[in-house]
């Protein structure tokens, strides 16, 4: 049966394995344990320790095996997932590459389309503008005042169409990231003379007051792209005049000195502010962001009443950004508007063309001239109606008469128009319809002193023809002017690289063409004129004189 009694002997033995306690055994007996018993217990606990450790190790191994299997399953799942993602990524990359290829092809097609459209639009405009201008000059006095006005209107309308083409091309260049700026040393007085001489007649015609004011501490020089600055100011001032019926238009030029101004905080260089103000119709505050978008104006009725495409401000904003600047608009309906162009004195990229301007003396406002200003870099300039007889009485009358010129162009309209222009300044003209005929004409006429080379022609285009001419030793020094209606990025550089001396875009600006021709046929005088231009702030226009009859074109 069951009973209860106190033990005579108790033994407590730890169960150890490699000095690690795994457990404890307590043994009791009604008699005293002998030494044999104790020795047995010592061996017994050692065996038990090994067995317990084996059980623990097996259990741990089993657990680790299970964990390993679980992780292997997870790893396989993750691997499958990664493979799926990789396959999806490869598909996405393939789609992106396909889309990129399509985009590149589309961009190429767009560029080719714009280039071809530019050529197709500019080619008829070239002869239209030149001939309309010749008619408006009325050298023989055979046209009535009304007929002269008709010709002037045709020329003005063609010029407006040309400006629209230029705006669309500029927008496409900006969207494609191909709009280039060429910062160089620019006397500020030269820029302001251009503005003053260009827009004062327009404001006088509309009965508006026009004033250009210059701050006392505005530097005389800056490093920026003269052509692009002219383009921005032209757009801002044209809008101000267009939308102002009465009152005034003003251009204020100041050095930005406010350290708290947002543009000053973002630019460590000196900043000039060109503020164009008017007393026109004004713009509602909620419409101000809209007017800087392409093809947008403040109001649909504005488009019908005042015309325009809404491209000018969009292009101006982007060009300002390329110059390191910004345009800010302030306006209120019925109270006029102020558009301020902030541009650094030293535009980004100036180190490519020279060091920083040294002459930071203030500009004197009284230095502004009322004489007409002629721009020499007129890639986007407006054609200005300077009469040909004025050129004859000036430098062209001394340099050009008797100098034979070859026109290589497949469009007889352009040949006809250019022949009359050059003939009126005394230049005998030959022409050829393509490059092959042009080379043959040169071989038959060694007295040709200048070549006007169209680019897009059948059989042998202008680039190929220029290269062929330059490969002939006796023609290596023959002046060649490339003429093209494409006017796309790289055309100028490509023409010069093939061997052309200069480049004139179509529609040909007569003033620019004659300036280039005079410079090529009389380089020493051209160098002297450049020296004078760098010293003087105003380029005077040529004086007037009588007109001679144009020589008809001849083919050889």
Image (spheres, rainbow, N blue to C red):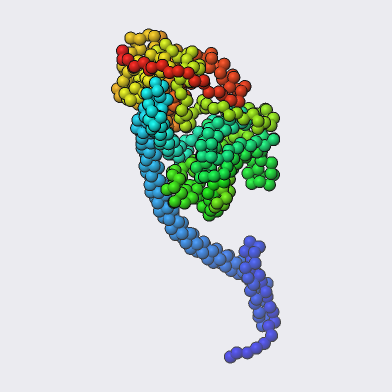
Residue 486 visible in the picture: no
Q: Is residue 98 left or right of residue 377?
A: left
127 in relation to 501, above or below: below
Considering every residue shown, the one lying at the far front of the view is 144
Name the spot of residue 13 as percent of width and height, x first: 66, 71
Instruction: Classify the position of the N terminus by image quarter.
Output: bottom right
Determine the image quadrant of residue 167: top left
Q: Is residue 355 visible?
A: yes
Please name whichever residue, 78 or 109, is drawn nearer the observer in this view of the structure: 109
In this rendering, the count of numbered labels is 0
Return the x and y of residue 44 as percentages of the image width and height. Answer: 60, 69
Q: Which residue corresponds to the image point at 64% horizontal and 77% vertical from the top-left?
A: 27
Residue extending furthest toward the left: 459
The quarter of the picture where residue 153 lies is top left
Which of the pair 445/153 is nearer the observer?
153
**Depth order, front residue of 183/187:** 187
- Give how far across and how far down residue 433 sits, in percent: 31, 20
Task: Quadrant for the C terminus, please.
Answer: top left
Question: What residue appears at the point 38 percent right and 48 percent down from the top-left corner?
Answer: 91
Left or right of residue 118, residue 382 in this image: right
Instruction: Identify which residue is drawn at 69% across, 44% down.
Output: 259
Q: On the picture, is 26 further left or further right than 394? A: right
Judge by depth and name the residue closer to the eye, 40 or 319: 319
* Image x and y of residue 431, in percent: 34, 17
Which quadrant of the figure has residue 529? top right
Q: Is residue 52 above or below residue 252?
A: below
């Amino acid at each position: 049966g069951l009973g209860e009694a106190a033990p005579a002997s108790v033994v407590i033995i730890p169960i150890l394995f490699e000095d690690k306690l795994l457990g404890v055994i307590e043994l009791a007996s009604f008699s005293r344990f002998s030494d044999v018993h104790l020795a047995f217990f010592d061996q017994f606990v050692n065996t038990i320790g090994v067995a317990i450790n084996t059980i623990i190790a097996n259990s741990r191994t089993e657990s680790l095996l299970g964990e390993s299997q679980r992780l292997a399953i997870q790893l396989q799942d993750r691997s499958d997932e990664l493979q799926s993602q990789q396959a999806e990524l490869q598909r996405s990359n393939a789609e992106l590459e396909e889309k990129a290829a399509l985009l590149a092809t589309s961009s190429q097609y767009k560029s080719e389309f714009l280039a071809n459209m530019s050529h197709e639009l500019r080619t008829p405009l070239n002869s239209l503008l030149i001939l309309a201008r010749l008619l408006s000059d009325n050298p023989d006095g055979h046209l009535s005042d009304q007929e002269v006005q008709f010709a002037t209107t045709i020329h003005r309308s063609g010029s407006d169409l040309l400006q629209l083409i230029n705006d669309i091309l500029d927008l496409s260049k900006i969207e494609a990231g191909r709009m280039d700026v060429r910062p160089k040393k620019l006397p500020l007085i030269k820029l302001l003379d251009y503005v003053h001489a260009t827009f004062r007649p327009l404001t006088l015609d509309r009965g508006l007051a026009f004033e250009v004011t210059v701050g006392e501490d505005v530097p005389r020089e800056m490093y920026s792209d003269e052509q692009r600055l002219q383009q921005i100011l032209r757009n801002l001032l044209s809008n101000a005049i267009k939308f102002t019926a009465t009152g005034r238009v003003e251009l204020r030029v100041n050095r930005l000195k406010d350290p708290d101004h947002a543009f000053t905080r973002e630019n460590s260089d000196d900043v000039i502010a060109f503020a164009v103000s008017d007393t026109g119709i004004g713009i509602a505050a909620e419409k101000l962001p809209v007017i800087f978008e392409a093809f947008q104006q403040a109001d649909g009725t504005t488009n019908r009443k005042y015309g325009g495409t809404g491209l000018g401000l969009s292009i101006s904003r982007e060009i300002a950004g390329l110059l390191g600047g910004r345009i800010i608009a302030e306006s209120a309906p019925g109270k006029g508007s102020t558009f301020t162009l902030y541009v650094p004195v030293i535009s980004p990229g100036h180190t490519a063309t020279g060091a920083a301007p040294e002459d930071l003396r203030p500009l004197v406002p009284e230095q502004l001239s009322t004489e007409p200003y002629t721009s020499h870099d007129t890639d986007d300039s407006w054609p200005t109606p300077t009469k040909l007889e004025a050129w004859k009485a000036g430098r062209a009358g001394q340099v050009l008469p008797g100098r034979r010129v070859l026109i290589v162009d497949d469009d007889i309209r352009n040949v006809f128009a250019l022949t009359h222009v050059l003939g009126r300044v005394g230049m005998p003209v030959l022409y050829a319809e393509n490059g092959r005929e042009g080379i043959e004409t040169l071989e038959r006429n060694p007295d040709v002193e200048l070549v006007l080379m169209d680019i897009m022609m059948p059989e042998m285009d202008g680039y190929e023809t220029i290269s062929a001419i330059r490969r002939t030793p006796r023609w290596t020094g023959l002046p060649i002017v490339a003429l093209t209606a494409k006017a796309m990025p790289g055309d100028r550089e490509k023409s010069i690289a093939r061997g052309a001396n200069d480049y004139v875009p179509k529609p040909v600006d007569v003033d620019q063409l004659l300036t280039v021709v005079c410079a090529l046929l009389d380089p020493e005088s051209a160098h002297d004129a450049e020296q004078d231009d760098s010293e003087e702030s105003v380029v005077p226009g040529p004086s007037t004189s009588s007109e001679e009859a144009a020589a008809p074109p001849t083919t050889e």
